[in-house]
Image: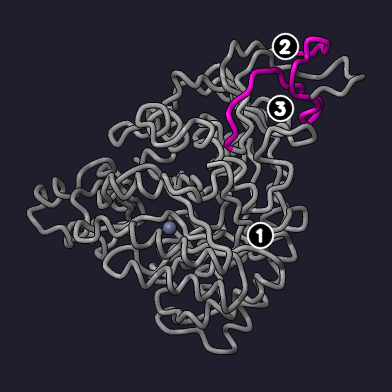
Amino acid sequence: MAKPNLRHADVVIRSAHLIDGTGSPATYGDVAITNDKIVAIGDLSEVSGSREIEANARAVAPGFIDVHTHDDRAVLSDPIMACKISQGVTTVITGNCGISLAPLASKLLPPPLDLIADRPESLFPDFSAYLNALDNEPPAVNLAAQVGHSTLRIGAMDNLERPATGEEIKSMRHQLDHALEAGAIGMSTGLYYEPASAAPTSEVIELAKSIRDARGIHTTHMRNEGDHIEQSPEESFRIGRDANVPIVISHHKVGGISNHGRSRQTLRMIDEASNYQAIAFDVYPYVASSTVLGVKRLETASRIVVTWSKPHPEMAGQDLSHISEELGCDLITAARALAPAGAIYFMMSEDDVQRILSHPKAMIGSDGLPHDDHPHPRLWGTFPRVLGHYARERGLFTLEEAVRRMTSLPAAQFGLMERGKLNVGSYADLVLFNQKTVIDRATFEAPTRAAEGIDLVMVNGRAVWENGAATGARPGLALRRQSLGQMGSNTTSGC
Ligand code: ZN
């Protein structure tokens, strides 16, 4: 409600379908913003705005929080972040899947670190230097950054194909503690990937104790999302229990035809474990995954599309089966010829994707890869696809519920206080969108098309996306753990 004496605000958005982020039914009213905060919500006919915006019954919601990104370098190299603001995203969580640009000095960039670091100079030996670089050259979106376990391993170990020794763990913990002091919000693992696959559970538990001490969060790209899908959540739960840290299972999925349907079981496991510990997960709304091109996934995918290749950039966007035919070789040989490279793997079932998306704990995370030549469409399409395709067209959940999974739920999980809800006093991270038309336009063939129906996006009170284009404003903040609230809150109300 408006403060009784409020007469004027910087911006007033009028006649909006207000979706507050909690999952509650939308209401009708106005929103006033002054500086970087929401100052009034309700009937604001008595309040004038330096700028007046007529919403005409379009939706106004809290800005979306992309909980799973690989935007670590993109926020510096392409700070306008059109791929995200065009979807209504106002905050991104980086440092996922075990990889972060800091803290590390290394000449080698083993995959998947090469998904975010294109050369050794893109690394930061010190985590505070990374955050300071963002303070000096801010992006359009807010960011909260994790430290990658693989990044720590690459820095501390001469050989990644074995467990870390006690000394190496000590050295990694020292680096991690330092990064947490600088403002990192936690640590991610990518136990599936080669730089970390030799790490035993006990190594991660030791490191996660630093996360506990700093009251941070632990996210994980699990060791296996295919044939051994049930063992992986068990490992994640154990890390959470033994180190006493909140866990986020990243991009939850079940890969490989023979495993389709097993999300029934994994979701049951997550529900069960949630009775005893803080567990959360995120998901992207597609049946195809994307990462580096490696031989491991070739058999589980029904179709593979190349997203980039260092030796053969001209192959980006082509099917690997087509390339192997052209070269007259098998898929493995073709994949080796293209490496280092990236790919899209069609390997999930629509039923599993919908089952995971519909779970009340499901947060939305794009997992977009911003440096790929021909990226997975999730980079540009994730959020409008959940709103337009899965909520409006498929009726998987209400629009209010879709918004909750992108706003208050992740805000509670990552301690993003004063974000994620339409509240007086909250930061004015807002999106104005047309709930009747919003839809993703990025496809596997044309993956960098901006979504439709996202009409205005504000970050900290400033418009960053308007009339189908970036405004050029870069009001994003590098959020430090010290300024955030408790992480790992298991809020599932409102579904
Ligand atoms: Zn991952």
Q: Which residue is drawn at 69% across and 32% down?
A: 422
Magenta-tinted stretch: 23-51
Mark 2 residue crowding within 10 angstroms, few (<14) / some (14–19) / many (20+) = some
- Residue that extends furthest to the right in the rendered view of this protein: 5
The reply to whether the magenta stretch includes residue 36 is: yes
- How far apart, in angstroms, are the residues tagged by discs 2 and 1? 37 Å
Left or right relative to 348: residue 103: right
Residue lying furthest bottom: 166
Q: Does the residue labelled 1 lie within 8 Å of ligand 1?
A: no
Residue at 49% across, 35% down: 83
The three-letter code of the residue at mark 3 reads Arg
Q: Mark 1 points at which residue?
A: 185
Query: Are circles 1 and 3 on residues that touch, CB within 8 Å?
Result: no
For the residue marked with disc 1, what is the amino acid? Ile
Q: Nearer the viewer, residue 150 or 3?
A: 3
Is residue 363 positioned above or below 221 on the image?
A: above
Of the 4 image quadrants, the one containing the N terminus is top right
Toward which corner of the image does residue 400 lie, by quadrant? top right
- Residue 71 point in image, percent of width and height: 53, 47
Q: Does the magenta stretch include residue 359?
A: no
What residue did someone put label 2 on?
52
Q: How crowded is mark 3: few (under 14 residues within 10 Å), some or many (20 or more)?
A: many
